[in-house]
């Protein structure tokens, strides 16, 4: 193993939903470990570009709407042609819709499952095709506590994130022998746009904090170490694992 098996110098990573939140935190951590980053975003990602460049790495932005699988092939092609290869894919972009199961709509089902699960699979397929032909790589899926738990009023989110856990194992089974590691990170409660409503609800915020052994919301940067590890040679024999980074939430 290298002197520093966590070093990502010379690697190229695609990070989806990298303009904000967990995607931004992961993109910056990978850059600080040495990787150049292709940021996939449908909104202005200039803040993350600046942070990656501040870390001394190259950043490009690939504009894409991930609610359909249409851009998947283009994303991989653009990253490779601009940055010279593809070693790491972080499937981070995701949405949530809340409603009682009894009233849940088809639109709230399809929007969440299409973005969180279908696009994740087909972008992994596009990246995997390149990685299989080019000696391997690492795929990291952003899962959830609801990969393990049922949740409430988030039917399509729970279905999608439980599916992400299954696909992580399936892809690891198919691609481990081809030099590709496929793993997931399950964030606990992280302060981002996705959880702004929960943070603003005084009662829910108190209930959440009381249950987190670490006693605080996570920050996007808290996911960085796990992402660097799973992207690196240090994790070369780690396969199909869903790593909780949750301040102890699941340990309760
Ligand atoms: P966030 O701040 O809302 O970020 C979500 C990201 O996904 C944004 O960059 C968003 O872009 C992007 N995105 C959503 N739909 C997209 C689409 N159709 N096309 C392109 N980009 C799209 O939330 P976050 O908390 O960082 O979430 C990141 C991931 O972590 C998600 O998969 C989420 O399910 C997961 N997660 C979060 C938590 C948490 O506590 N925060 C816990 C467990 C899992 P825009 O900014 O343009 O909307």
Image (cartoon, grey):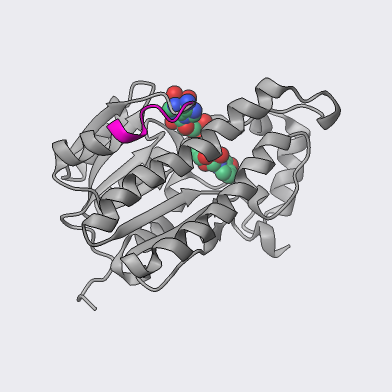
Relative height, residue 243 to residue 100 (above, below): below
Region rendered in magenta:
68-74
- Identify the residue shown where x is 25% and y is 42%: 37
Residue at 37 percent of width and 30 percent of height: 19
Q: Position of residue 80 (x, y in %)?
A: 19, 41
Q: Position of residue 107 (x, y in %)?
A: 66, 21
In what quadrant of the picture does the N terminus appear? bottom left
Q: Is residue 123 above or below residue 188?
A: above
Quarter where residue 72 is shown? top left
**Could you say which quadrant of the image residue 78 lies in?**
top left
Q: Is residue 20 magenta?
A: no
Which residue occupies the extreme right position in the image? 102
Q: Residue at 44%, 28% (x, y): give it.
A: 66
Residue 155 sits above or below residue 139 on the image: above
Q: Residue 106: tell me if it is visible.
A: yes
Residue 164: give x, y in percent of width and height: 56, 49
* Side (left or right) of 222 relative to 191: left
Is residue 69 on the magenta stretch?
yes
Residue 190 visible? no
């Amino acid at each position: 193993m290298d002197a520093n098996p966590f070093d990502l110098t010379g690697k190229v990573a695609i990070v989806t939903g990298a303009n904000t939140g967990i995607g931004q935190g992961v993109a910056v951590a990978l850059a600080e470990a040495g990787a150049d980053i292709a940021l996939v975003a449908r909104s202005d990602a200039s803040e993350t570009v600046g942070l990656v460049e501040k870390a001394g790495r190259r950043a490009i932005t690939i504009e894409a709407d991930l609610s359909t699988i249409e851009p998947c092939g283009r994303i991989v092609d653009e990253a490779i042609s601009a940055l010279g290869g593809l070693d790491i894919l972080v499937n981070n972009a995701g949405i949530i819709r809340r409603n009682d199961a009894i009233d849940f709509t088809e639109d709230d089902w399809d929007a969440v499952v299409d973005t969180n699960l279908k696009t994740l699979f087909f972008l992994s397929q596009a990246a995997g095709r390149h990685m299989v032909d080019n000696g391997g790589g690492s795929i990291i899926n952003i899962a959830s506590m609801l990969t393990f738990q049922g949740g409430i009023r988030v039917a399509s989110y729970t279905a999608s994130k439980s599916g992400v856990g299954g696909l992580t194992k399936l892809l690891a089974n198919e691609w481990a022998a081809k030099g590709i590691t496929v793993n997931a990170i399950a964030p606990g409660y992280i302060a981002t746009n996705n959880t702004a409503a929960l943070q603003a609800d005084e009662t829910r915020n108190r209930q959440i904090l009381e249950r987190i052994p670490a006693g605080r919301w996570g920050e996007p940067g808290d996911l960085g170490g796990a992402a660097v590890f799973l992207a690196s040679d240090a994790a070369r024999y780690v396969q199909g694992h869903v790593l909780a980074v949750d301040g102890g939430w699941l340990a309760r």
